[in-house]
Image (cartoon, rainbow, N blue to C red):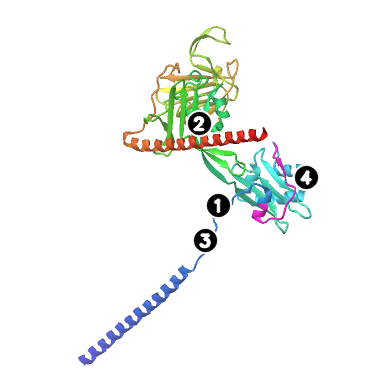
Amino acid sequence: MKKVFKNILLGHFLLVICSFIILLLSFDINDANSTQINNNTNNIPVKRPLNLFNLEESADTIFNLVQKIGAKPVANIKKTRLKKNENLSAALKRINYENYHINKIINSIRKLNKGHKILSSLPVGMMIHYSKPSSITGAALKLNYTKTKDIFVWQDINDTYNSQVFLRPTRMEETLIKGVIKSNLYISALKSGMPENTLLEMISLLGFSIDFQREIRSGDSFEVLFTKKIDALSDLVTETEPIKYVSMNLSGKKLIFFNYKDKFGLPQYYDENGKSSKRTIMKTPINGARLSSRYGNRKHPILGYTKMHRGLDFAAPSGTPIFAAGDGVIEKAGWNGSYGKYIRIRHTGTYKTAYAHLSGFNKNVRVGKRILQGKIIGYVGSTGRSTGPHLHYEVIKNNIQVNPMKIKLPAGKNISKADFNNYKNHIEKIINLKIVLEKSNRNNKIAINNHNMSKKLILN
């Protein structure tokens, strides 16, 4: 009996083992089949989704855009500009578009990403290239919406209106500008071909080392190396990158500074020995102004009696930009009695600067806000007790006004010893680039001169 029972148990055990083996084999087969199917699927090429944020490049004319996009043919292209207090609908009505077409054009732009915002923010003076519809040709508009983008509106072969934003193509160009000061730095720099924002950047950068009112003479020279972003369609400069190199020769005294990014990736400037261009406070927080009244006793022009003048006065046209003399926090911005519109900035526990008689404040100026050195904070005016447009500028040390021309200000942070070799390699690259650009400029001048001489010979 026991033997029979053991045989039965053994039979059940063998049956379980066989079932388990069959089950394992079936899983292996399924896994193998499944893996093969998946591999085949992975080998089938899948079309990637379009990147909707990559814009197509614009074209220089409506004709070329029509060919690029496959729109209905156009003819008789004209242009106009968006006038002050005029929206796109009013502009189209002014150039005799019919209401039906105006509504279709506006609706097509509204369908763009942020279309409503685009229509409400079209800039005054925006160029509008247009072609009106006829029985044969289609309507088309090219709007120079921003420096970098165009909006193209067109009719397709079914007379349906479509809109699309195009990116204006650009190119980067390394540029070296040299100039000699004849009347003043501002005019001479602009005549040499320097963009105004690069000029203001240069003035801000050199404002720690140069007194622009007293140290610049006719015959002094300057050099600036920077990168321009140029619109490939109009050949106009749209942006400039931070200055890479700047030098100024003041009656034989040469100042040279190189751009070198700090640990936060922000541009800072140092001389050949790694000393910072910065000082705690700029000597002059305004460009192109005349020092009209110094620090000290003077006969007050309005009150009529001798009074201590605890600052510097810079005569300049109303609206001339005023820069923050140093990094700091805006402590006061508003009306301040005889000072008129007034700003005071706290730079350190020791130093503050004050700016009076302003015509207005920069829109970003608010009490408690941190401001960076060289940023525009306001504009020259004649508010408060003032006889004409000028900036009254004060430097306050330990809450006492001091003579800005006589204080010795500490320098900014210099290049560390550990980083000095990297800095030397960096400025060597900039110098090599400068040499290449100088050679290129010389070759261009020779080519132009040879061309002009050839023209004279032919004419003669």
- Give percent across and percent down for residue 270: 40, 31
Along the line of sight, the residue nearer the viewer: 256 or 279: 256
**10 lies left or right of 306:** left
- Give percent across and percent down for residue 161: 70, 54
**73 part of magenta stretch:** yes
The label shown at residue 201 is 2
The label shown at residue 48 is 3
Looking at the picture, which amino acid does disc 1 mark?
Asn
Looking at the picture, which amino acid does disc 2 mark?
Glu
Q: Helix or strand or loop: what does disc 1 sit on?
A: loop
**162 lies left or right of 214:** right
Q: How many angstroms separate mark 4 from mark 2 (CA)? A: 45 Å
Q: Earlier in the sequence, mark 4 or mark 1?
A: 1
Q: How many angstroms separate mark 1 from mark 3 (CA)? A: 14 Å
Decide: is 33 above or below 381: below
Q: Helix or strand or loop: what does disc 4 sit on?
A: loop
Q: Classify the position of the C terminus by image quarter.
A: top right
Q: Nearer the viewer, mark 2 or mark 3?
A: 2
Q: In this figure, which residue is indicated by the disc labeled 1? A: 54
Q: Which residues are magenta?
A: 65-83
Looking at the picture, which amino acid does disc 4 mark?
Asn
Decide: is 198 above or below 357: below
Q: Classify the position of the N terminus by image quarter.
A: bottom left
Q: In this figure, which residue is indicated by the disc labeled 4? A: 96
Disc 1 residue crowd, few under 14, some 14–19, many 20+, Cα 10 Å? few
